[in-house]
């Protein structure tokens, strides 16, 4: 499996990088050695089932929790000892924001805006209205979804160089979600913002992500460009009579009740599928990311 | 041309940049886009469809390499001069080949003889 993990980004220039992160809660392992580095201007979609360790990985990468072992760097600085400058260039939206509950949305945005040199007050005001947040309601009285929307506005208005979003889609209706994706896409493409976001809504990720990382049971199963992933992997189906010819190498292998076999296979260096794909009755099916994810995460 | 003329299906197995190139090829082959027509900017396409601008750049770059588009200084991308207003019928039919192969495969899987499939297809084509 390790051959599939790319190590092209040197951790020296990466806005965000993790090396060998391990963590566990109450004796059960959540992260089992994760290496991950983001290139400047890239949009990395982190995908995984509930409980795969996505939030823990994000928190460890940002220095919000101390991992059992391994290290994380933000803008080249140790994540656990971030300076104020690095903090002002970074914005993180947790799944359940809790800070500053005693302020109204408007007060909070005015207050935190002072700490960010590139604060866009216009954007904050405008988006508050568009995303239907009552500006004078206490944050503590907002629903969890509204609370996360306010926090998304805070993160975007600060015009960060590094934007980290933990399951941002859950709080937004389809229209607002599309707006968020548009912001993320354009900022990455035009301002060079580096983005890490976790989600289980794969189609969001397919729109804006340049790369995906599959986190499964505390390990990265796959790290690849979105386009390359779609072009490089497919499902090979072999009828029972040919299943003995299945290639030894595959990302997943499922035998069906009738003896036929489904495998996730990869093109070789020349762009060819494994030889078994040419057998009579064999079939290659292109896979969307969601199908691929379901196949290999099962 | 307007960005809304493109249809993007993010969850299709085909990468978005290929979807864009394929649609440009069809729009040009059918004569809906003609030589000199300006394409929407990368930003417009990315913004309209909420997709990564790099994906759009990649599609435009590929279309430029294939000779479908050319870069006009200061104006952006336009349909290339070498493109005939409409391709020959053979060329246009060739663009339909992947869908036809797919259709043939499904028909075989369903063990349908060619006749009823062709009759239904003719009907659809006449609509």
Image (spheres, rainbow, N blue to C red):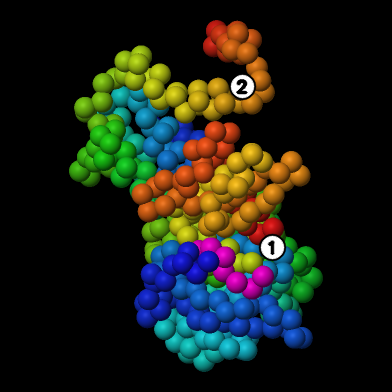
Q: Is-magenta flag for residue A218? A: yes
Residue located at (63% from left, 13% from top): B113
In the figure, A36 relative to A80: above or below? above
Look at the image and tell me whether residue A227 can be seen. no
Q: Position of residue A204 (x, y in %)?
A: 58, 53
- Name the residue tied to disc 1: A49
User: Residue A154 is drawn in which quadrant?
Assistant: bottom right
In the figure, B85 relative to A229: above or below? above
User: Pointer 1 indicates a residue of which chain?
Assistant: A
Q: Position of residue B31 (x, y in %)?
A: 35, 20
Residue located at (53% from left, 57% from top): A249
Q: In the rendered view, does A192 fall on the left or right side of A102? A: left
User: Residue B79 is drawn in which quadrant?
Assistant: top left
Image quarter in which the C terminus of chain A is found: bottom right
Residue located at (37% from left, 53% from top): A269
Gap between marks 2 and 1, in whole Å? Answer: 36 Å
Camera-side residue: A219 or A227? A219
Camera-side residue: A48 or A283? A283
Q: Which residues are magenta?
A: A217-223
- Name the residue tied to disc 2: B107
Main secondary structure along the magenta-highlighted residues: strand
Camera-side residue: B57 or A108? B57
Q: Residue placed farthest to the bottom in the image?
A: A81
User: Pointer 2 indicates a residue of which chain?
Assistant: B
Residue contact between numbered discs 2 and 1, judged by CB atoms under 8 Å: no
Residue located at (54% from left, 11% from top): B125
Look at the image and tell me whether residue B14 can be seen. yes
In the figure, A228 relative to B108: above or below? below
């Amino acid at each position: 499996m390790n051959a599939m993990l790319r190590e092209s980004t040197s951790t020296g220039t990466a806005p965000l990088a993790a090396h060998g992160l391990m963590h566990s809660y109450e004796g059960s392992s959540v992260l089992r050695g994760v290496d991950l580095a983001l290139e400047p201007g890239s949009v990395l979609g982190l995908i995984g089932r509930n409980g795969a360790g996505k939030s823990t990985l994000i928190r460890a990468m940002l220095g919000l929790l101390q991992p059992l072992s391994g290290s994380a760097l933000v803008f080249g600085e140790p994540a656990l000892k971030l300076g104020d400058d690095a903090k002002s260039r970074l914005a993180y939206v947790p799944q359940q924001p809790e800070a500053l509950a005693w302020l109204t949305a408007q007060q909070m945005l005015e207050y935190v805006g002072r700490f960010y040199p590139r604060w866009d007050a216009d954007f904050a005001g405008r988006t508050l209205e568009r995303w239907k947040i009552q500006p004078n309601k206490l944050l503590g009285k907002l629903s969890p979804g509204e609370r996360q929307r306010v926090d998304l506005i805070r993160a975007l208005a600060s015009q960060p160089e590094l934007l980290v979003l933990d399951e941002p889609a859950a709080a937004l209706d389809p229209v607002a979600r599309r707006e968020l994706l548009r912001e993320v896409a354009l900022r990455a493409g035009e301002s060079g913002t580096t983005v890490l976001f976790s989600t289980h809504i794969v189609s969001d990720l397919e729109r804006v992500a340049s790369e995906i990382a599959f986190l499964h049971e505390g390990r990265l199963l796959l790290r690849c460009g979105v386009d390359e992933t779609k072009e490089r992997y497919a499902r090979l189906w072999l009828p029972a009579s040919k299943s003995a010819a299945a290639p030894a190498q595959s990302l997943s292998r499922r035998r069906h009740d009738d003896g036929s076999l489904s495998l996730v296979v990869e093109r070789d260096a020349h762009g060819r599928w494994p030889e078994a794909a040419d057998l009579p009755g064999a079939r290659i099916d292109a896979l969307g990311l969601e199908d691929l994810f379901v196949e290999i995460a099962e | 041309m307007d960005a809304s003329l493109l249809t993007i299906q993010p969850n299709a197995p085909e990468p978005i940049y290929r979807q864009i190139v394929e649609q440009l090829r069809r729009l040009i082959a059918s004569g809906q886009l003609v030589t000199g027509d300006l394409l929407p900017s990368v930003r417009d396409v990315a913004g309209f469809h909420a997709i990564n601008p790099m994906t759009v750049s990649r599609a435009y770059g590929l279309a430029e390499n294939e000779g479908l588009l050319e870069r006009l200084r200061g104006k952006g991308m336009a349909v290339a001069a070498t493109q005939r207003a409409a391709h020959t019928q053979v060329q246009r039919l060739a663009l339909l080949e992947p869908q036809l192969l797919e259709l043939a495969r499904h028909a075989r899987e369903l063990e349908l003889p060619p006749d009823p499939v062709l009759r239904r297809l003719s009907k659809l084509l006449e609509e």
